[in-house]
Amino acid sequence: MDWRVQFEAAFETLLLRLRADMAIKVLVVVNSQLMRFSTGEVQYGNRSSQVVYGLAECVHNVSHKDCEVCLEKSNDKLLKCCGGGNNYKDGGTVMVAGHCMVRYETYKFFSRVRSGGRLDASNGSSSSGAVNVLVSNENGGGKCFRSKVVAVWGVGLGCLVVVVFCAWLLRRSVVNKTKVHGLSLNCTRDTE
């Protein structure tokens, strides 16, 4: 059997498990907080290293029903747009919708759960540093695009440098005007 077919079957199984697990966990209270996320993994292919990992999460102020609907739509979009073996070589995909987020990767990008039902920082990393992102709007429309994490950090750092440079120029301008104004006052006093 082709690895893409195996991957697509495992991927679909993972998405269904995440959704079912979320439906169960949302009813369980941990430390007085609802569990609003689910993680999972499914092996595919003949090697134990062929695993697809997934995470589903809903925002904390959304109802159980809205969470379920959002996850269902997200899973459908992932399967149609970015899912399956087509993106296996390119890394995983993140589906961001109004009330939920679903992510899958071919490496383990999440670690353990802290008390309170929130995830600790991820312990995995993508070899390419890239993640496919699917952003969906409320009307059901969406768009797949490739996002480089390094590029986002670079743009953020570039903006910070520009802001610091502009602040320095502004300060320099104020200091120079003060010096010029001080010199002109001294010249006026000397002529009187």
Image: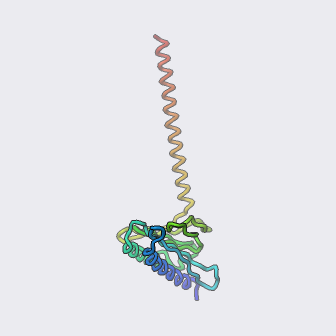
User: Exactly how many numbered labels are in the figure?
Assistant: 0
Q: Is residue 3 above or below residue 152?
A: below
Question: Percent x, y for residue 11?
Answer: 52, 80
Question: Percent x, y for residue 187?
Answer: 49, 16
Residue at x-position 54% and y-position 47%:
161
Question: Percent x, y for residue 169?
Answer: 51, 38
Question: Percent x, y for residue 112?
Answer: 57, 70
Quarter occupied by residue 96? bottom left
Any part of residue 80 in sight = no
Any part of residue 46 in sight = yes
Residue at x-position 43% and y-position 77%:
23
Work out whether residue 43 or residue 36 is closer to the camera in this orientation and state it.
36
Q: Residue furthest bottom?
A: 1
Q: Which residue lies furthest to the top in this view?
A: 192
Work out whether residue 77 or residue 14 is closer to the camera in this orientation and state it.
14
Q: Residue furthest front?
A: 31
Work out whether residue 133 or residue 191 is closer to the camera in this orientation and state it.
133
Q: In which quarter of the image is the N terminus?
A: bottom right
Residue at x-position 48% and y-position 77%:
18
